[in-house]
Image (tube, rainbow, N blue to C red):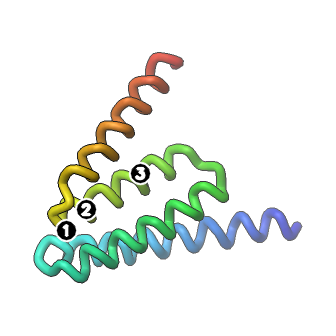
């Protein structure tokens, strides 16, 4: 029972972080500090996704982090992340 409870708690934390991350990201379009905080939330969410073993959520978290980098004008790193995720998508798509 503790394993299931732990997984449920991780899912709940992920949902909450997603809500906060979206809010900070919305303000991140206008304020640099909010973009930085959105990136921090994305990395926390990424750690949870890795613990859950949810590859789709891992990919989404990386893209959310890339968005925060774009808002911070760190375009080269964001471009690398997006290209990596695009390559991963096409590899998975070929397997289906």
**Residue shown at 30%/37% (left/top)?**
83
60 on left or right of 46? left
Report the residue marked by disc 1: 72
68 on left or right of 48? left
| Structural distance between the alpha carbons of marks 2 and 3 | 14 Å
Could you say where residue 22 lies in the image, as x and y percent from the top left? 32, 70
Element at badge 1? loop
Marked residue nearer the N-terminal end (3 or 1): 3
Could you say where residue 9 lies in the image, as x and y percent from the top left? 67, 72
Q: Is residue 91 above or below residue 11?
A: above
Q: Local crowd at mark 3 within 10 Å, few (<14), some, or many (≥20)?
A: some
Q: Disc 2 or disc 3, which is closer to the eye?
A: 2
Q: Nearer the viewer, residue 30 or 2?
A: 30
Image quadrant in which the N terminus is located: bottom right
Q: Is residue 62 above or below residue 20?
A: above
- Where residue 60 is drawn, which disc sits there? 3
Report the residue marked by disc 2: 69
Could you say where residue 40 lies in the image, as x and y percent from the top left? 40, 73
Image quarter for residue 49?
A: bottom right
Q: Are discs 2 and 1 less than 8 Å apart at CB?
A: yes
**Residue shown at 35%/69% (left/top)?**
39
Element at badge 3? helix
Q: Nearer the viewer, residue 87 or 55?
A: 87
Q: Is residue 81 above or below residue 42?
A: above
| Structural distance between the alpha carbons of marks 3 and 1 | 19 Å
């Amino acid at each position: 029972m503790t394993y299931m409870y732990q997984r449920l708690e991780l899912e709940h934390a992920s949902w909450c972080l997603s809500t906060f991350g979206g809010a900070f990201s919305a303000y991140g379009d206008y304020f640099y500090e909010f973009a930085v905080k959105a990136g921090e939330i994305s990395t926390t969410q990424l750690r949870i996704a890795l613990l859950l073993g949810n590859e789709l959520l891992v990919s989404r978290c990386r893209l959310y982090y890339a968005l925060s980098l774009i808002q911070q004008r760190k375009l080269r790193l964001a471009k690398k992340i997006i290209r990596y995720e695009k390559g991963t998508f096409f590899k998975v798509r070929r397997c289906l």
